[in-house]
Image (spheres, rainbow, N blue to C red):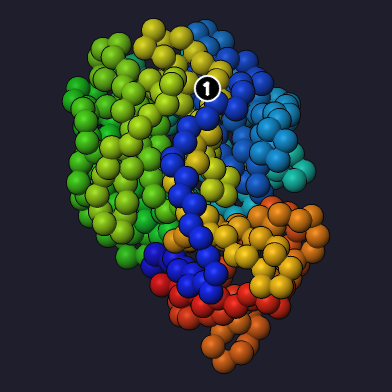
Amino acid sequence: MKKCIVFLLSLISFNCFSQSWTQIGFFSGAIRNNAMAFSVNGKGYVGFGQNGNSYFNDLWEYNPSNNNWVSKGVTPLSSRKQGVSFSIDSMAFVGLGRNSNNVGLSDFFKYNSNTNVWTAAAPYPGNGEALCFFASANGYGFVGGGISTGSSTSYHRDFWRYNPVLDSWTSLGNIPLGNRAVGTSFSIDSIIYFGTGHDGSTAYNDFWAYNVNSNLWIQLPNLPGLARIVPISFVNQSKAVVGAGSQLSTSNVFSDYYEYNPSTNTWTSIPGFANGKRSRTPTFTIDSVSYIATGSDSLNNSLNDFWKFEYPMTTQLVEGLLDNKRTEFYPNPVENKIFFRFNLLESNRVQIFDLNGKLLIDDVLIGKSKLNLNFKSGIYLLKINNESVQKLVKL
């Protein structure tokens, strides 16, 4: 169920910030494309990939608090490109891909970012080895489609679920896209979205939704624009952004971007960014900011520029009733997390009650902070520093 919160304030004003793409530097590792990326425990990670004949098996960690990259060294995985990567709870999972000899790989590893330790997991049993669809949802990983290499390249449609607790894979049949690879996939809540890519001869711009709970597939409206392969995609505040990528069998690289809103099942064209004409680019999202790193341009040159995307949001300002303190919290509507900014670097007590007066959250926040909202839908009361009382409606 989509969750959001509407704040009805006694004293509020609204500041609407437009969507923005901002270059925030450069990836600190070697220039590359076809890399893999994920976020876990509040940090982002980019590694593997290729640049011409050079293939990589390193991993780099990005810390958004200081906008800094740190090398995590060489991984125990062999050098590769076009693999899969996702996070489940506090762990990341990486595997599959192709090596410099164009040999497909099926190995799979668990990564603990707290200890920087890699552990071999159960190999992927599916037919695809590289350029697969992949995502995680509801505590499971999902992988399907992709290509296998040998005397010739084959395209596949089998679909699998990974259980990190049992370290096991379960077949979920076939994806309805047909034999497909080189597309994009992502998850929003309990739904995984698959789309674009090609089957070896034809490129597509169709999109499909897979419900993890019911095991049902639904075809969605097509991605606007031309059919494409290896597009960019990421999820931010329960909406998806998909765009760029390249045209099959040509050197044409796209620069158009679209937003998918699952609540209305619609696509909307949104502005791109200065260097948005690219493909083979991994992404990751931390809280309400998405990041784009590396990739390749229309001349097949590898890239190392690093960009962030901040989704349009409304910031609400709550003026203190007694001491003129100001609290900013956003976004609105909100999903699972609410962010606060206090203009004074001192402790601020934030409480949330249900209508029966039961205290659900009682925390002390300073400066820029966030709270996870894990309670069910309903009406609640927000109190800040025992002064401002707001009604919260969680839908």
Q: Quadrant of residue 31?
A: top right
Question: Which residue is pictured at 27% across the width and 42% down the height?
Answer: 268
Toward the right, the furthest residue is 346
Tell me the residue that label 1 is attached to. Answer: 294
| Residue 294 vs residue 98, the one in the foreground | 294
Q: Is residue 280 left or right of residue 259?
A: right
Question: Please, what secondary structure does the residue beneath circle 1 have?
Answer: strand
Question: Which residue is pictured at 46% across the width and 80% down the height?
Answer: 378
Q: Is residue 59 left or right of residue 145?
A: right
Q: Quadrant of residue 203?
A: top left
**204 over 354 or under it: above or below:** above
Image quarter in which the C terminus is found: bottom left
Kindly tell me whether residue 103 is visible in this rendering.
no
| Residue 45 vs residue 389, the one in the foreground | 389
Instruction: Check disc 1 and give the amino acid type.
Output: Thr
Q: Position of residue 211 (x, y in %)?
A: 33, 59
Image quarter in which the N terminus is found: bottom left
| Residue 200 vs residue 325, the one in the foreground | 325
Question: Which residue is pictured at 44% across the width and 61% down the height?
Answer: 333
Q: Is residue 58 left or right of residue 300?
A: right
Toward the bottom, the furthest residue is 356
Q: Around disc 1, counting alpha carbons within 10 Å, would you say few (fewer than 14), some (14 to 19), or many (20 or more)? A: many
Q: Position of residue 364 (x, y in %)?
A: 75, 67
| Residue 320 vs residue 167, the one in the foreground | 320
Q: Position of residue 142 (x, y in %)?
A: 43, 48
Question: Which residue is pictured at 49% across the width and 52% down the height?
Answer: 15
**125 over 209 or under it: above or below:** above
The tally of labels here is 1
Q: Position of residue 19 (x, y in %)?
A: 44, 40
**302 over 307 or under it: above or below:** above
**253 over 360 or under it: above or below:** above
Kindly tell me whether residue 22 is visible in this rendering.
yes
